Image (spheres, rainbow, N blue to C red):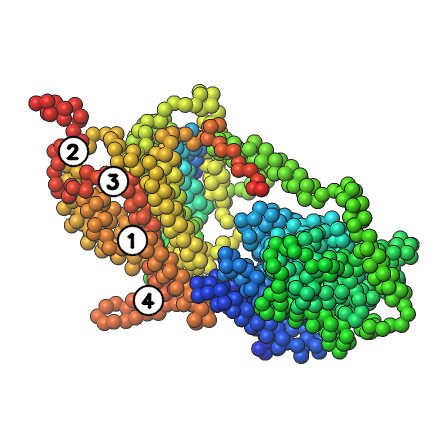
Amino acid sequence: MIFPYKIGTSLTAQTGVSHLSLFLIAALPFLGAVFPALLIRAGRNAAASAAGLTTFLALMGLLIHIPSVMRGDVVTARFDWIPGLGLNANFMLDGLGFLFALLILGIGLLIILYARFYLSREDPMGQFYTYLLLFQGAMVGIVLSDNILLLLIFWELTSLSSFLLIGYWRHLPEGRQGARMALAVTGSGGLAMIAGMLILGNIVGSYDLSVILQNKELIQASPYYLPALILILLGCFTKSAQFPFHFWLPHAMAAPTPVSAYLHSATMVKAGLFLMARMWPVLAGTDAWFYIVATTGLITMLLGAVIALFKDDLKALLAFSTVSHLGLVTMLLGFGTKIAAVAAIFHIINHATFKAALFMTAGIIDHETGTRDVKRLGGLRHLMPITFTIGTIAALSMAGLPPLNGFLSKEMMLEETVHTTWLHSHYLVPGLALLAALFSAAYSFRFVAHVFLGPERDDYPAHPHDPPVGLWLAPAFLVVLVVVIGLYSAAIVGPLVAVVSSAVIGGEKLPYYSLKLWHGFTPALYMSAVATLGGLFLLSLHKRGENLWNALPRPEAKTIFDAIIGGLTRLSRRITDELHNGVISRYAIILITFTVGLGYYAYATGTIGVETRIPLPAQPIPIIGWICLVGATLAIMWFHRNRLLSLVLIGVVGLIVSMAFNYLSAPDLALTQISVEVVTMILLLLSLNFLPTETPWDSSAPRRWRDAAISVVAGIGSGALIYALMMRDFAFPTISDFHLATSYKGGGGTNVVNVILVDFRGFDTFGEIIVLGIAALIIFALTEAVLSTNVRGYLLNRKPHWPQSGDSHPLMMVVATRVMMPIALMVGAYIFFRGHNQPGGGFIAGLIVAIAYLMQYMASGYTWAIERQRFYYHGTIGWGVLIAAATGLGAWFNDRPFLTSDFGYIHWPPLEEFEWATAILFDTGVFLAVLGAVMLALDSLSRFAWQPGMAQEFPMDINPLRDDPPEEEQEKEQA
Amino acid sequence: MEALVASAVGVMTAAGIFLILRRRTFPVILGLSLLTYAVNVFLFATGRLALNAPAVLNKYEDVPYTDPLPQALVLTAIVISFGMTAVIVMIALSAYLSSKDDHIDMSASDSVDAPGEDA
């Protein structure tokens, strides 16, 4: 039927074709992620090409937006996903998003090339590219999101996919630990950020970034500004490895080098910076922002630089230098001035280029020499000239030497620190920044001097030589960028920096700045000179410095982290063990008493209206039914130790319940209940075959009294509640009137219950048949698992509880069931087809047909029935779900939401006019799924009962020897 | 009539809960079945009771109809609860056949030490 309300799936086009391409850019990596995993069977080149092509396409999609981005336009694509929650799949592309997407996709492409040659034959490359593309998609999603809820989803996705990437070498304990640590730190930061973002959204009243960014005054005046700021910054700081969360980044270096290069130069750790830049217009500019962000950045910058100098592992050195540079950008953003924001953006670009190149260089050295321990390297400049050139240029840019790009942004940074006062001190920030720059220069020089310079050695683990072109091409490209950006910065990245910076500062007028090498004799130039010379001096003292460093006591972050995590694990384990001790009846008691208590609380504190309905008169037959039901129920409680008897009694209860449904105007329910009753009884009887026939006494008398008291209270409560409900009219108008009014006009059926099932609430029903199918598959799997253990032997040799009839397939029953089979199927078909207009439908028909089949199993035996079975029940379930889904999808081709149904009338003389609805196709799916599920469940249970001797018996065969008591057999043998 | 339905729901709930609190699998399964009846009738009754007013539209005259929505919900609930009963029956059966013990509570010897951190 056509829904009266509109389900929001509208694309509001703004700029013609372009709005779609934003979705495509974000979706392509996710879509493409399938291909490497599949194509790896066609070879490693195929997998790598698929990944590369996907990234390339996404990159092209991004680049076609250059004209509009450069004009300063914001490209948007909107899609109302869950409007009720304010969750819209809105994407926007402005300068900032463009820069980051460019870095993510551009460097991603280089990494894909590099990884193809880096990974060895043993590494599962398809998996690698799949993870990489998933990660890439998540990152692109973050930077293009225009909705903070959507952004949070992508944010969490990066945590998850980076976990897979960092732990890619799962055979290495360091890899697993590093991945776990990264996930724990960034994941918990992400949780904090979710809270912060929700607060922010609440303050503004919208979760759309573009709206939030317009409301600076509102946000900063709100009393919730500070909590929101701190929570969001927790997310950013953990992601961007800011002090004191910096420790996860070096441990994540256990990943393969392409991953390190990608995650730690251009993407993952930049996500935190991106978010700070994104939120800069509304969050920055307060004292809280300055002192939290700038101070954290400053400490991180200094700490990272100092530690990096004393790391011998090349990747650890680069990791800490990354921490330091991230601190630098954070600090710049923290200053809160526009010009500092420009410097931050410029440094993000520069850092991405030289750091990715350096990571790749470290990977090449590791790959070709067999080690990345600085102490075992040295003198590689003649052995690996290409690598030497690439590495040296990149490292000198990191040190901040002219004319490379690192120099430019470092100058700008130093210049800004000079203008910054921290708690009235003019010297603190520039002083510490200078110190950090000095250490930064020192470790960069060390990277060059201790790896490439010095005498050649003869004890390299492998003979060093330059790698194939595939490995050095990517870093070489980046190094060219390093040089070119350094020399012609204003021409090459000037416009980009301008566009991005104006996006960061919220579209306001840019301050004056110029990107050039020579600014005259400024304080920043002197500071640069001091840093460079100081760095050289520090390097010459490295030996002594190292001894001092090793002698100093240092807190080891991993130990602290492990201790905290260990403590938390022990605590939660203790709580879990206390609460969840395996005594299921205790859980049940807690649940029931709590529910009863809650009900009592509601009763005691709420108000109850007056009775508005007149009770229906109780006639004699319902009273007799009530007596039977209550009597049977009480008898079950009394006789429940005799299991067979209690099954008979529960059958009585079920029968009366279905009669009551029929009496109370619910014929569909009555039909369903009675057919389910039959199937359930067969199931329980079959299972009782294998279980003890008696329940022994094992609860003490006080315990039984306590349980009885709890259950009586709960029973009185539920009875009273439903009585009170039934005696009153609805407090609000219900949707049922709508269903009654539109069932025929909109759904084309007069049986409203069936129309609700297959049409109004078809999506529910669709879910339910899936659940039913899953339940049946669980039963099948459980049977398979149990029968593959030694239980099978026990079952084969089992003696039944009760004496068996010599006539296992009674003639009468076999004949009767076979005659009844076509009739039963007819009834099933009849019930099915009338379902839309009269009581019946797919559920009931499925059950009836299942019972028809079960009769054959019972009368003629499992073996006989299974030999005649053409279709597996798994397939029946699957077809059912697929047919239902296909019917639902069909609505899409007519531009209607999923599961919209259609109907019409057909008139074939001499038949009466009849109606045809697509809902009947859906009901066919329901029918098949129910039939398959019931049959699969009972079929699995029957397999327990199968014993080898049964195969020789056929229906209507009589075997007088069957199950003779052993004594008689022995007597016969003796005779 | 309402009193009959309500008291039946109450009795079935009480019996169901009492059996759920037993310590062997079979009574617990019986208890869950009884509780299922109780819950289904409860949900059905939230649509209020009506006699001779099935929610099947009558083309020829204007007649009252009962509330169809709870019926539709209960219908699927009946079928799903069959599926769930079948699953717990199989779990109970497999547990009994594997351990020759049909207690539902874990004894102390059943609990396995949690695996340590991998290193």
Q: Secondary structure at mark 4?
A: strand
Distance from the alpha carbon under mark 3 to that under mark 1: 18 Å
How packed mark 4 is, by other alpha carbons closer than 10 Å (few <14, some 14-19, many 20 or more), is some
Q: Earlier in the sequence, mark 4 or mark 2?
A: 4
Judging by the rendered image, the residue that carries numbered circle 4 is A916
Q: Earlier in the sequence, mark 3 or mark 2?
A: 3
Judging by the rendered image, the residue that carries numbered circle 3 is A946
Q: Which disc, if any, is residue A962?
A: 2
Distance from the alpha carbon under mark 3 to that under mark 2: 15 Å
Residue drawn at (70%, 49%) of the image: A247
Q: Amino acid at mark 2?
A: Arg
Distance from the alpha carbon under mark 2 to that under mark 1: 31 Å
Asked if residue A386 is positioned above or below residue A959 in the image, the reply reads below
Asked if residue A41 is positioned above or below residue A252 in the image, the reply reads below
Distance from the alpha carbon under mark 3 to that under mark 4: 45 Å
Residue A610 x, y percent position in the rendering: 53, 42
In the current view of this chain or complex, which residue is farthest to the left? Answer: A975
Quadrant into which the N terminus of chain A falls:
bottom left
* Chain at numbered mark 2: A
**Label 4 and label 1 in one chain:** yes
Q: Earlier in the sequence, mark 2 or mark 1?
A: 1
| Quadrant assignment, res A682 | top left
* Chain at numbered mark 1: A
> Nearest the camera: A728 or A70?
A70
* Chain at numbered mark 3: A
Q: Earlier in the sequence, mark 4 or mark 1?
A: 1
Q: Earlier in the sequence, mark 3 or mark 4?
A: 4
Q: Secondary structure at mark 2?
A: loop
Q: Which disc, if any, is residue A872?
A: 1
How packed mark 2 is, by other alpha carbons closer than 10 Å (few <14, some 14-19, many 20 or more), is some
